[in-house]
Amino acid sequence: MRFLILLTILFAFGCNKGNTTKQPIPNYYRTTKTITYNNINVDVVIDNPDLKEVDVLITFHGTVKSDKNIVPAAERALDKFKRILNRQDMMIISVAHPQYNILFGDNIVQAEAALLWVKFCADQELGITIKKIFLAGHSQGGYIVTRLNTMHQTDGVIANAPGPLNLVFRCRLEENGQIPTSFVCDTLRSAYGTTTTNSGAYFQRSLLNFTDGFKSDILFIQGLNDKPIQMHSWPVFKQAVLNCTNCQDRQFVEITDAGHAALFESSSAQSKFNKFINSRR
C-alpha cells in the first residue's frame, strides 16, 4: 500500500500542465501543447477525436535544419501518419523533439518525457481514457522510437527507415570529404574528436548500438532504393536485430521499389503498418 501511495505521488509530481492553443477541426481538435514530465518540457501536436476512450499513436518526425522547424515538422509527421492510418478513432500525438545545440541522440530525453506524459498524465490533462499506446517514427524519428523500445514497454512500435544506423561510417565519409558536412557530425567531432581517434563515442550513439532488449513488438519498414549511406549498414542492422535473444517480436518489411519514405509511398507498406496496429486491438 505504501508503494502504491508513493507511486501515485511520483506520477502526480511528474505531470505538469503546459500551455495550449486549440484549433477546431471537424470531429477533431488539433492542439499544440507544451507538456512537462519530471521537469522536461517538449512541444507536442495533438489530433484528438471527439471520443472519451482512445488508442494513441505517438509519432516522431525526421531531421530538420533548425529547431524553428520542429513544430511544423511534427505537424507534417502527424498529417502523414494520419493519411495512412485506416482508423478514425485514434488519437495522434506528434512530438516536436529538438535537434540543434545538442549532441545527436540527446533528444531521447524529450522523447522519453513525451512517452511518459502520455502514459501517466495525458488522461487526466486531456480528460480522456487512454487504452493502447503505439510509437511510430520516420528516419531520425525511427531512430528515436527504436531506442525508446529498449527503455519502455508499449503496445507496438513502427520505425520507417530508421537512422543514422552507423555514425562512424557516416561521419568518416564527411571527414574524408566524400559527402557534405552536417550539423550532426560537426557537433560530435567538436565533442569527441574524429571517428579515427574516438570511434567508440560515435558508435554508442549509432542505432547499431540499440539492437537488443526490445520491450515491445516492433515493425521495421525500409525502402531498398534508399540512399547508399543508409543501405550500406541496413543488412548489418537487420541481422543484428534478428539475432536478438532478449527482444519481443521483430518484423521487417522491405520495399524494392521505394526509397527513404517507403511507408508513405508504398500501399503494401501501409497495409502492413495498419495490420500491425489493428492486430493488437
Image: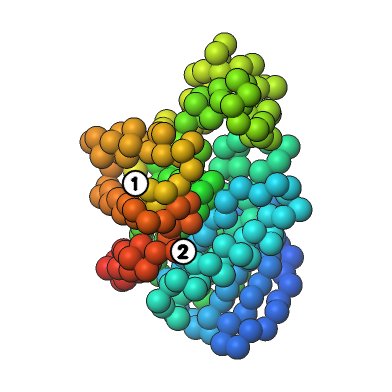
Which amino acid type is shown beneath numbered disc 1?
Answer: Lys
Q: Which residue is denoted by mark 2 in the rendering?
A: 264
- State which quadrant residue 173 falls in: top right
Name the residue at 65% across, 33% down: 180
Q: In the depicted view, which residue is nearer to us: 98 or 125?
A: 98
- Which quadrant does the C terminus fall into? bottom left
How many callouts does the rendering have? Answer: 2
Q: Give the farthest residue toward the top.
A: 197
Tell me residue 85's x, y (percent).
Answer: 43, 72
Mark 2 or mark 1, earlier in chain: 1
For numbered disc 2, what is the local secondary structure? Answer: helix
| Crowd rating for badge 1 (residues with CA inside 10 Å; few <14, some 14–19, many 20+) | many
- 2 vs 1, front mark: 2
Mark seen at residue 215 = 1
- State which quadrant residue 114 falls in: bottom right
Residue 237 in view, yes or no: yes
Q: Indicate left or right for 250 with 35 as reference.
A: left
Name the residue at 56% across, 22% down: 172
Residue 247 in the image: above or below residue 236 = below
Q: In the depicted view, which residue is nearer to us: 82 or 178?
A: 178
Which amino acid type is shown beneath numbered disc 2?
Answer: Phe
How far is the residue under mark 2 from the one under mark 1?
Answer: 26 Å
- Which quadrant does the N terminus fall into? bottom left
Residue 279 in the image: above or below residue 189 = below
Tell me residue 184's x, y (percent).
Answer: 64, 34
Q: Give the farthest residue toward the bottom.
A: 26
Tell me residue 91's x, y (percent).
Answer: 50, 72
